[in-house]
C-alpha cells in the first residue's frame, strides 16, 4: 500500500493532543474537588462503572481518528487486474516484405495463423484489438471480445508499401484511450508529473509484430516515449530471418498500393513471385521500444517460434498490477469508529445519571 499525500499523516497529532486535553481536564477537576470527611461515603454514593467502560469509548475514538488520518493521506492498494479488465492491442506489420518465403509458406500467412491461434487461446472475456501498419497505420478492429470478428479480420490482411512501426504504436495507444479514461490520446499534452515513466502500468498492453525496420512516419522510440508517459507497456516481436528469400504472396494478400502492383493484376488466381532480397530486423530499436515501456523483445525466426512467443505473452500481460485509491474505505471505517465511540459514551453516561 502507498500514500498519495503522506504529509496528511500529521493529522495523527490530534490523538496526543486529545490525550493531553483529557489529562488537563482531570487535573482541573481534582483541584476543584471539595474535601470530604469520609472518602468511603463518597465512593458509596457514586454509581459503579467498571474501568473498561471508561476506556472503551476513548480508545474507539482514538482508533477512528487514526483511520481518518490514514484516509486523509489518500492510501492506494496494489491489486492484480485480470485480462477481463484490460485490452490487448495487436499491431501487425503488413509491409511488402511480409511476402518473404524464408518462413513457409510466407511470413504473412504464418503471422496470420499465429495471431488467430493467440486469439482463440484467450479467455472469453479478454478484449483484443487489431492495428495494421504499412506506410500508414489504422485500427482494423477496436478492442472486442468477439473472437470470430477478430479472426475474420486477421484473415483479410493485405500487404502495402512502407513500414511505420511508430505510427502503429500511436494508433494502438489511441485505441486504448477510447476504452480506458486513464490513458490520454496521443494528441493530448500530459501534465509534467503524469508524463514521467514509472513502474505503475496500465492493464492494457500493446504487442507489435514486425519483420523489418521503420521506414517512414514517427520514430518508434519516440512513439514508445508516448506509451511510457501513459504507462502502457509495449511488447515487440521481430519475425523472420536474415536469409535472402523470394517474395511470394497470393492474390488476396496483395493491396492496391503494394510494391508488387495492384490487386487486379492477380485476379486470375496467380500468385506473385519476386526476386530474393536481404531481410533485416531492426532489433536494437525493437529492444529499446520494449525497454522504454517496461515490455520485452522476442525474436521469432519461424512459425513455431512466433506461435510460442505469442503463446507465452499471457503470462506477462494478462495479469497486471494496478493502484486503486481506497480513501473512501478509510473514511467509512474511521467515521463508524468515531460514531460508535460517541454513542457508547453517551449511552453509558446516561445510564450512570439514571
Image: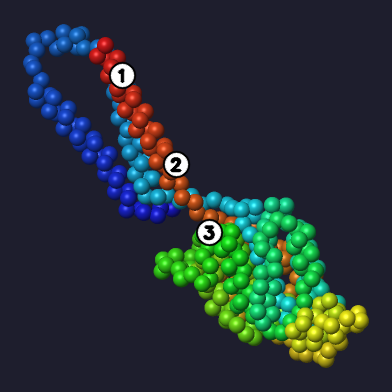
Decide: few, some or many residues near mark 2? Use Cα within 10 Å; few <14, some 14-19, many ≥20. Answer: some
The C terminus, quarter of image: top left
Of callouts 1 and 2, which one flags the residue occurring earlier in the amino acid sequence? 2
Q: Secondary structure at mark 1?
A: helix
Classify mark 2: helix, strand or loop. Answer: helix
x and y percentages locating residue 200 in the rendered image = 51, 61
Residue designated by label 3: 181
- Circle 3 residues within 10 Å: few <14, some 14–19, many ≥20: few
Pointer 2 residue: 329
Q: Residue at x 64, y 55 (%)?
A: 83
Q: Looking at the image, is mark 3 or mark 2 nearer the viewer?
A: 3
Q: Position of residue 291 (x, y in %)?
A: 57, 72
Q: Residue at x 13, y 25 (%)?
A: 29
- Return the disc, 1 or 3, that comes first in the chain's sequence: 3
Q: Is residue 74 visible?
A: yes
Q: Nearer the viewer, mark 1 or mark 2?
A: 2
N-terminal of the pair, mark 3 or mark 2, is 3
Q: Between 339 and 44, which is closer to the camera in this rendering?
A: 339
Which of 335/59 is in front? 335
- 215 shown above or below 139: below
Cα separation between marks 3 and 2 = 23 Å
- Give the numbered dot on residue 348: 1
> Quarter-wise, where is residue 155 in the image?
bottom right
In the image, residue 156 sits, relative to residue 42, either above or below, namely below
Amino acid at each position: 500500500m502507498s500514500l498519495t499525500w503522506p504529509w496528511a499523516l500529521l493529522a495523527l497529532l490530534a490523538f496526543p493532543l486529545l490525550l493531553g486535553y483529557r489529562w488537563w481536564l482531570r487535573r482541573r477537576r481534582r483541584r476543584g474537588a471539595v474535601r470530604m470527611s469520609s472518602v468511603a461515603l463518597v465512593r458509596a454514593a457514586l454509581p459503579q462503572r467498571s474501568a473498561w467502560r471508561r476506556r472503551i469509548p476513548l480508545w474507539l475514538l482514538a482508533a477512528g481518528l487514526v483511520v481518518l488520518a490514514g484516509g486523509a493521506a489518500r492510501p492506494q492498494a496494489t491489486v492484480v487486474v485480470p485480462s477481463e479488465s484490460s485490452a490487448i492491442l495487436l499491431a501487425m506489420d503488413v509491409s511488402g516484405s511480409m511476402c518473404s518465403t524464408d518462413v513457409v509458406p510466407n511470413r504473412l500467412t504464418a503471422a496470420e495463423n499465429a495471431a488467430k491461434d493467440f486469439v482463440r487461446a484467450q479467455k472469453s472475456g479478454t478484449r483484443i484489438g487489431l492495428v495494421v501498419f504499412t506506410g500508414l497505420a489504422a485500427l482494423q478492429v477496436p478492442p472486442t471480445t468477439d473472437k470470430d470478428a477478430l479472426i475474420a479480420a486477421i484473415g483479410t490482411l493485405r500487404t502495402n508499401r512502407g513500414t511505420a512501426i511508430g505510427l502503429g504504436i500511436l494508433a494502438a495507444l489511441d485505441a486504448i484511450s477510447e476504452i480506458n479514461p486513464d490513458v490520454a490520446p496521443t494528441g493530448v499534452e500530459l501534465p509534467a508529473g503524469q508524463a514521467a515513466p514509472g513502474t505503475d502500468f496500465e492493464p492494457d498492453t500493446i504487442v507489435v509484430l514486425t519483420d523489418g525496420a521503420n521506414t517512414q512516419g514517427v520514430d518508434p522510440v519516440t512513439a514508445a516515449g508516448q506509451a511510457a508517459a501513459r504507462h502502457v507497456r509495449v511488447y515487440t516481436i521481430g519475425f523472420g530471418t536474415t536469409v535472402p528469400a523470394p517474395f511470394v504472396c497470393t492474390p488476396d494478400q496483395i493491396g492496391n498500393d503494394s510494391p508488387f502492383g495492384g490487386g487486379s493484376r492477380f485476379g486470375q488466381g496467380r500468385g506473385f513471385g519476386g526476386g530474393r532480397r536481404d531481410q533485416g530486423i531492426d532489433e536494437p530499436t525493437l529492444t529499446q521500444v520494449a525497454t522504454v515501456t517496461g515490455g520485452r523483445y522476442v525474436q521469432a525466426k519461424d512459425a513455431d517460434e512466433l506461435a510460442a512467443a505469442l503463446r507465452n505473452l499471457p503470462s506477462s500481460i494478462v495479469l497486471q498490477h494496478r493502484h486503486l485509491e481506497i480513501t473512501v474505505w478509510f473514511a467509512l471505517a474511521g467515521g463508524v469508529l468515531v460514531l460508535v465511540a460517541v454513542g457508547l459514551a453517551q449511552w453509558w453516561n446516561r445510564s450512570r445519571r439514571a
